[in-house]
Amino acid sequence: MGLFGKMFEKKTCSICGGEIGLLGNRKLEDGNLCKECARKLSPFFSDRRRSTVEQIREQLDWREANKERVAAFHVTRTLGCDTKVLLDEDAGRFLVTSGPRWRDANPDVLDFSQVTGCDTETRETRTEIFWEDREGEEHSYNPPRYDVDYDVYVTIHVNVPYYDSIIFKVNDGRIEERNSVEFREAERQAREIREALGQLREGEREKIAQAAAPKTARTCPFCGATTIPDANGRCEYCGGAMGA
């Protein structure tokens, strides 16, 4: 079969077994992926071409299980404006979404303890401005002039098998001045997200450390017995509340 024939050869999705239409193939390291299966992958995943069929299957299983975490997610706090970081502080989990019907999109629900860091960054975009002569040809000014826009980004570093960061823009429109109200508000939102995730991450890690720490015997203030409090922080002899 010639090169032209191979280009239009019908391919089968290595995941669902369905036929892949023209221009619908998403190449894997050792197979093919249809666009329907590709849509089910995490939006923060970008290493498809170097992934094996087995790795894609594992991620899709993880994404399917994520639907239960989404269904159980209870928003206790919302950070951001256009792209939002939603917190479930009772369950120790968060998600990042930009859609109003976010439950339908099955956004990745992660634990606070999976956050390894959070950075904020201001990116500057410079677009040169030209002037036109009578013939309509464009020329640079001397010295060159630029239209400058600013965007504020947040990068959440995470410990996830399929990606290591979530990057999104905080502002939802053009920011033309660094000293504008819009720029200061975008910086405030980015800082709030960074500080909140940092505090929640440290809180979860302290809980994990406390749970792993060896228990020591104490004297019960109610019955005087020397004992190690049970899982509910109560004396094993009289049931008095000794605390954790």
Image (tube, rainbow, N blue to C red):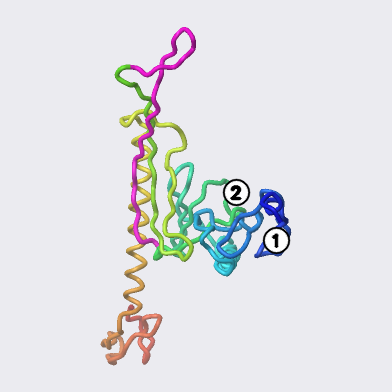
Which label was assigned to residue 101? 2
Which label was assigned to residue 208? none
The amino acid pointed to by label 1 is Thr
What is the span of residues highlighted in magenta in the rendered image? 115-141
Could you say which quadrant of the image residue 204 lies in? bottom left
Question: Quick one: quadrant of the C terminus?
Answer: bottom left
Could you say which quadrant of the image residue 207 lies in? bottom left
SS at circle 2: loop
The amino acid pointed to by label 2 is Arg
Label 2 crowding class (10 Å Cα cut-off): few <14, some 14-19, many 20+? few
Q: Is residue 138 magenta?
A: yes
Q: Residue at x 55, y 67 (%)?
A: 55
Q: Residue at x 50, y 55 (%)?
A: 46
- Give the main secondary structure of the magenta stretch: strand
Q: Residue at x 47, y 59 (%)?
A: 88
Considering depth in this image, is 161 or 243 the residue closer to the camera? 161
Q: Which residue is mark 1?
A: 12
Mark in front: 2 vs 1: 1
User: Is residue 195 visible to us here?
Assistant: yes
Whole-percent x, y for residue 113 in the image: 39, 65
Closer to the chain start, of discs 2 and 1, is 1
Whole-percent x, y for residue 122 in the image: 34, 40
Q: Is residue 43 magenta?
A: no
Q: Residue at x 67, y 61 (%)?
A: 13
Residue 34 lies, with reference to residue 151, above or below; the image says below
SS at circle 1: strand
Whole-percent x, y for residue 225 in the image: 29, 92
User: Is residue 68 visible to us here?
Assistant: no
